[in-house]
Image: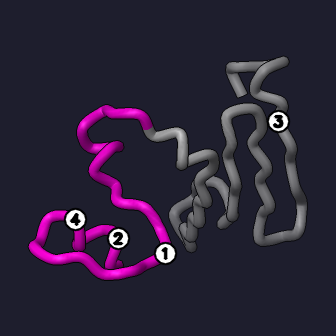
Amino acid sequence: LAPTFGPGGKGTFPADGHSPRSLLRSEDSSWRSSILLTVFQPGFGGPPAYKAVRTRTHKYIRYINKESELYDLEADPTS
C-alpha cells in the first residue's frame, strides 16, 4: 500500500511497487503490463467463477470447474 498512498504525502521511504497516479492522470503507464481478475458469482445464474490474466496481447481464463480459455487479442480483438 505504501506506493499507493506514499507519493501524496510528505517524506520518502523505500518500497516496492508503483503509484497508480499515472493511471489516474492518463499519463504513461508502461509499468502496468497485465492485470489479474478474480470473479466469484455464486447463485446468480451468470458465468461460473473464474480467474483471468489479461495482457496487451493475450487473455487467459481459468474457471472454477478447471476449464480454461486462451485468447490471442491481436488475432481476434473482439475476444
Crowding at mark 4 (Cα within 10 Å: few <14, some 14-19, many 20+): some
Instruction: Name the image quarter holding the C terminus.
Output: top right
Q: Return the disc, 1 or 4, that comes first in the chain's sequence.
A: 4
Q: Which residue corresponds to mark 4?
A: 7
Crowding at mark 1 (Cα within 10 Å: few <14, some 14-19, many 20+): few
Q: Which residue corresponds to mark 1?
A: 16
What segment carries the magenta color?
Answer: 1-28
Crowding at mark 2 (Cα within 10 Å: few <14, some 14-19, many 20+): some
Q: Is residue 3 left or right of residue 16?
A: left
Whole-percent x and y of residue 12? 24, 76
The CA span between labels 2 and 1 is 7 Å
**Front-lying residue, 48 or 24:** 24
Q: Which residue corresponds to mark 3?
A: 71
Q: Are marks 2 and 3 in contact (CB under 8 Å)?
A: no
Q: Are marks 2 and 1 in contact (CB under 8 Å)?
A: yes
Q: Return the disc, 1 or 3, that comes first in the chain's sequence.
A: 1
Q: Return the disc, 2 or 3, that comes first in the chain's sequence.
A: 2
Crowding at mark 3 (Cα within 10 Å: few <14, some 14-19, many 20+): some
